[in-house]
Amino acid sequence: MDTNTIQQLIEQGLPGARVAVRGDDGVHFEALVVSDAFRGKLPLARHRLVYATLGELMGGEIHALALRTLTPEEHAPQQGGAEG
């Protein structure tokens, strides 16, 4: 598994989302996902939305995925390098 594939799957499952994925070993990843779909949702619900975009890959090819899930408004104050 690679970061580009994970990014594409999340972007397809959450249209309009901005996604940045990191992971050097091919099984452990971290992702920043910024989406309007997270408005009004608690962190667990946000994570479930992201996990749903990855389906059976979670727990299989993707052993671990650390998530930061933000709305565009939550992300705006942090934009000075949060994705870098």
Image: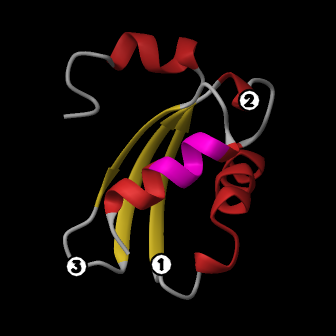
Q: Is residue 50 above or below residue 73?
A: below
Q: Quadrant of the C terminus?
A: top left
Decide if residue 24 is on the left or right side of residue 82: left
Q: Is residue 77 above or below residue 55?
A: above
Indicate which disc, 2 or 1, sits on the residue closer to the N terminus.
2
* Residue bearing mark 1: 62
Decide if residue 8 is on the left or right side of residue 50: left
Q: Is residue 75 above or below residue 31?
A: above
| Residue 21 horizontal/vertical position (percent) | 35, 51
Distance from disc 2 to disc 1, alpha carbons, whole Å, reads 23 Å
The residue at 20%/24% (across/down) is: 81
Question: Which residue is most to the bottom?
Answer: 60
* Residue bearing mark 3: 25
First to last magenta residue range: 8-12
Q: Callout 2: 10 Å neighbours few (<14), some, many (20+)? A: some
Badge 2 element: helix
Using the rendered view, name the quadrant where residue 70 is placed: top right
Tags 3 and 2 touching, CB below 8 Å: no
Viewer-proximal residue, 39 or 37? 37
* Residue bearing mark 2: 37
